[in-house]
Image (tube, rainbow, N blue to C red):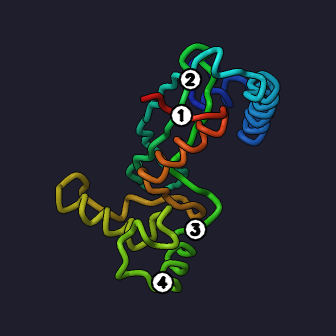
């Protein structure tokens, strides 16, 4: 039913299963897939000089609406994925969201570093958006009439947005560590 895009609520109703049991089963599937991938995609055994080093990177905007009881507007978050041309192996995948920190913690660290006068590129915490930057972005969207009310946009209580350009840069370095030598030919 998951593969056929049946909603979680319908799956629970049809199978007479609780949400807790359903999420437990989904976690089980996730663990099994991760184990399979770890065994199958051991890139240390691949000789990229022999099979070629052509890669394709694609980005997709995901509209996420975090679980909540109040009405919310989805937040667009980017997902990047790099695949090897011949094998189809997924070399690297990244999501524009870092769950290890809160927006408030990011704001506190940015204020403590006292870097407001520096360009974002030269800040110690340039990788992530602060709470103020995210709110300013929402105000900008409202001015351009892309949203009606900024209070409806919210990230989860735990986690911060990663800057998209930094995400792309990290993707390049993450993919390049899979094989020796220069990444591109001239």
Residue at 70% x, 21% y: name it: 47
Which marked residue is nearer to the observer: mark 3 or mark 4? 4
Task: Give above or below for 88 relative to 17.
Answer: above
What is the spatial separation of the Cα atoms under label 2 and label 3, in whole angstroms?
38 Å
Q: Are marks 3 and 4 in contact (CB under 8 Å)?
A: no
**Nearer the N terminus, badge 4 or badge 1?**
4
Secondary element under disc 2, as helix, strand or loop, is: loop
In the image, residue 162 lies at what x, y percent?
Answer: 49, 56
Which marked residue is nearer to the observer: mark 3 or mark 1? 1
Task: Bin the neighbour count of mark 3 within 10 Å (Cα to Cα): few under 14, some 14-19, many 20 and up.
Answer: some
What is the spatial separation of the Cα atoms under label 3 and label 4, in whole angstroms?
14 Å
In the image, residue 31 lies at what x, y percent?
Answer: 80, 34
**Nearer the N terminus, badge 2 or badge 3?**
2
Label 4: which residue? Answer: 111
Q: Are marks 1 and 2 in contact (CB under 8 Å)?
A: yes
Task: Bin the neighbour count of mark 1 within 10 Å (Cα to Cα): few under 14, some 14-19, many 20 and up.
Answer: some
């Amino acid at each position: 039913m998951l593969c056929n895009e049946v909603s979680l609520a319908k799956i629970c109703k049809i199978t007479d299963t609780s949400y807790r049991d359903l999420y437990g089963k989904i976690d089980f599937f996730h663990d099994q897939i991760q184990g399979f991938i770890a065994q199958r995609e051991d890139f240390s055994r691949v000789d990229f000089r022999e099979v070629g080093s052509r890669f394709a990177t694609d980005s997709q905007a995901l509209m996420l609406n975090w679980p909540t009881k109040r009405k919310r507007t989805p937040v667009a978050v980017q997902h990047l994925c790099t695949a090897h041309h011949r094998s189809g192996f997924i070399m690297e995948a990244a999501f524009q969201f870092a769950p290890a920190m809160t927006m408030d913690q990011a704001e506190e660290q940015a204020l403590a570093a006292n870097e407001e006068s520096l360009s974002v590129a030269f800040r110690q915490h340039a990788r992530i958006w602060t709470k103020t930057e995210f709110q300013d972005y929402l105000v900008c969207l409202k001015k351009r009439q892309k949203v009606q009310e900024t209070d409806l946009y919210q990230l989860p209580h735990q986690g911060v947005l990663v800057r998209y350009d930094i995400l792309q840069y990290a993707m390049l370095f993450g993919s390049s560590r899979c094989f020796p030598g220069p990444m591109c030919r001239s």
